[in-house]
Image (spheres, rainbow, N blue to C red):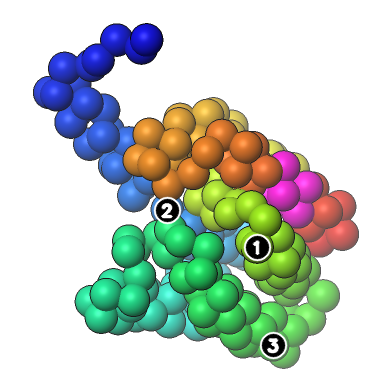
Amino acid sequence: MRPVQPRPFLDARRRVARWVSIVLHPFVTTLVLAGAVASGDGASAALRTTAVVGVLFVLPLGVLTARQVRRGAWSTVDASHPRERPLLFAVGAAGLLALAAYFARTQPGSALTTGTIGVLAMVAVCAAVTPWVKVSLHVAAAALAATVLLGRGHVLGVPLAATLPLLGWSRVALGRHRWREVALGLVIGACTGALVTRFG
């Protein structure tokens, strides 16, 4: 029998896990990745790219999440139940298509265009396997970002990669995922990041 942990310890553990999940939320890692990739063209390009990604991708998903949780349609802001995910994937894919069209028009053939298409492919894979396994999108997004940044030799690559075990733990500690779902997110995200780096 496993020893019963004191309540204060469990509460503190959960608070830490929640903060890790907030700081490394897919919205955050996506914006960091976009800004870092665009920073090669200067600070103004990084700010502009981050703003565009925020408006076309992050904002619609944020509005959807707030609406669904407020209506009671989703149990948590993470769309934790598999049945809650199709709408999340659909809105996310629409935002990524809009981003891909924007980057293809303004920066044809750029790493941002290739990267957006790669993220769209990753979302499609996660959506396809959802009936059988609920992939950790937190870990997938962070693993993709870390892999791309490492491949580009960016200063944020190593610290972001180092946080992946902690992020995986936080998702399990909060009861959002099992370890196999975290591991699958890591594999899918890292493989997508490697492909984006190779062809971007």
Query: At 38% from the left edge and 34% from the top edge, which residue is drawn?
Result: 173
Q: Where is residue 142 shown, x and y percent of the image?
A: 56, 47
Are dots 3 and 2 in contact, CB under 8 Å?
A: no
| Between marks 2 and 1 in the image, the one whose residue lies nearer the viewer | 1
> How far apart in space, not on screen, are marks 2 and 1 (Cα)?
23 Å
* Nearer-the-camera pick, 86 or 32: 86
* Residue 159 vs residue 86, the one in the foreground: 86
Q: Name the mark nearer the viewer: 1 or 3.
A: 1
Q: Earlier in the sequence, mark 1 or mark 3?
A: 3
In the rendered structure, which disc, 2 or 1, sits on the residue that comes first in sequence?
Answer: 2
Q: Secondary structure at mark 2?
A: loop
* Quadrant in which residue 42 is drawn: bottom right
Residue linked to disc 1: 131
Q: Is residue 58 above or below residue 29?
A: below
- Type of amino acid at the residue the image marks with label 3: Ala
Amino acid bearing label 1: Pro
Q: Which residue is mark 3?
A: 101
Q: Residue at x 78, y 81 (%)?
A: 108
C-alpha distance separating marks 1 and 3 = 29 Å
Residue of label 2: 25
When the figure is inspected, residue 151 is found, relative to residue 50, above or below; the finding is above
- Magenta-highlighted residues: 187-193
Dominant secondary structure, magenta: helix
Q: Is residue 178 above or below residue 71?
A: above
